[in-house]
Amino acid sequence: MYRIMTSDEAISLIRDGDCICVNSFVGIENPVELHEALHRRYQQTHSPKHLTIVSSAGFGVWDEDRAAEGYIRAGAVDRLICGHFGAMPSTKKIILENRFEAYNLPLGCISHAIRAQAGGIPGALSKVGLDIFVDPRRDGPGINQISTDSSFVKVVTVDNEEFLYYKLPKITVALMKGTAADRKGNISFDDMYMSGDALSICQAAKANNGIVIVQVDRIVDMPSRPRNTIIPGCLVDAIVVKAPEPRDEAFSALTGSFEIPYEEWSGWTEKLEAACSGSRQRSTASHIIGRRAARELRKEDIVNIGIGIPETISHYARQSGMLDHITLTVESGGIGGFPASGKVFGAMIGAASVYDMANQFDLYNNGGLDICFMGALEVDRYGNVNAHRGPGAYAGIGGFANITAKTPTVVFCLTFNTKGLEVSEKDGEITIEQNGSVPKFVNTLRSVSFSARKAIDNGQKVLYITERCVFILTARGLKLLEVFPGVDAERDILSQLPFEVEAGSEIII
């Protein structure tokens, strides 16, 4: 039977050595009050310690002085297993200092491994991850030098087919954020941007004789409608009430509490960008890439658009009217709306449906998307891509590996080089005013996020769109497919590459 507690009382239920699973998505829907109570307790008692924390999509709030960052820095955590670390600025730094073990697994594979545990199964099989960094025959999932545990990912063969087997430590504590608890302890997510893996995490904790702690905005007298209850009260041990912080009305567009027709998506996006410290100015190069990439969209496509340069695609899809004829999706479970970006990435404006994250990755893993648009840090001559690890820094693979593993058309959107790149466009002619000092096309990748060999085996169409040209993946590697007007193929492309590529008949667009 659940009890209503203060955050300090609830956190006192956590024991040394527990494995905590946090339901959040990058920077949204994080139970901040619970994290900060855990930090207070650790400061006062040096307990709970030797913690393992699991999160499909990360659990930061873009602020190194809030949420879990404090107790992670202080030494309460021995192991961290996450799909994405982008919203955790100080944690990312100290991981590279070998302060504790840290592992990066594909977001969807963590989600499915949690769901497996909820059903009493130790782990989950997946084709996702074969022949990229997480494959133990390559690098394995460890981020730093002390992260050598080989139990999280194994290569197995079932019915003569090769899979990766993802296994997590047994979850013993579920940390949740919900909207409201009714008098029976049922938890609704009415005002939340997503529900993530909430139910599976709670079921997994209970399967392991663990505890469920939920932070809610309020207590309500009347029971929620059954379909609106994400976590039934019988699974809940502690409820902590914490009134939400005031926020701009623009964020109400992300809760699904009122209908937002397609015609209003643009207006609400502008309001959100203003509320999140202003809209970002996109470079000329980004717009060239986004405009060309948008031409790959077809009516009735089911689509995923990544963050960064790919976000410009939506502008041109709206301009052409195509945005009204495709279905956009986001990894957290939203489908049929317009994905938000920045600090509220994972939320959607005008979503038709928001379901469990594991179900969204069922769609991605089985090739249910028609096309995806992803960013890239590096590309090699064979068409392999590094999208998650830069020099001395990383964000994590997130949902990238799941999204690109089987989608029929994969479009990578990246500048040809960076750090000092200057591009101009006039009357449809593109001029490379100055090349950047950091190449994006390299002989050797720092890490592999996307396997060109697997893509060829799967029969996927793969494009690499830059501000000056388009490459396509062939069985022999990269092939120069298009050179944009104003660009000199030899001077601006071929002589800038550290390797030779096949050059097809140039198509000037």
Image: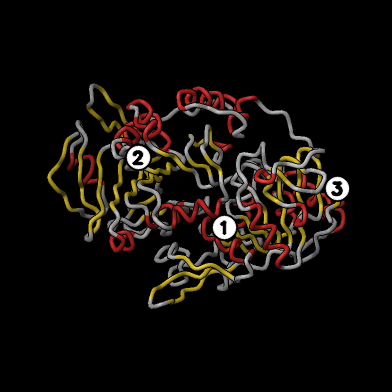
Number of the front mark, 1 or 2: 2
Sequence-earlier tag: 1 or 2: 1
Sequence-earlier tag: 3 or 1: 3
Position above or below: 21 against 338: below
Mark 3 to mark 1 CA distance (whole Å): 28 Å
Number of the front mark, 2 or 3: 2
Residue wearing tag 2: 300
Sequence-earlier tag: 2 or 3: 3
Left or right, 269 with respect to 487, comes to right
Circle 1 Cα neighbour tier, 10 Å, few/some/many (<14 / 14–19 / ≥20) = many
Give the number of marks.
3
Residue type, mark 1 in image: Ser
**Residue 373 occupies which quadrant of the picture?**
top left
Relative image position of residue 488 (x, y in whole percent): 18, 37
Residue wearing tag 1: 111
Q: Is residue 93 visible?
A: no
Residue sitting nearer the eye, 463 or 10: 10
Residue wearing tag 3: 4
Residue sitting nearer the eye, 367 or 278: 367
The residue drawn where x is 69% and y is 64% is: 171
Mark 2 to mark 3 CA distance (whole Å): 47 Å
Residue sitting nearer the eye, 119 or 378: 119
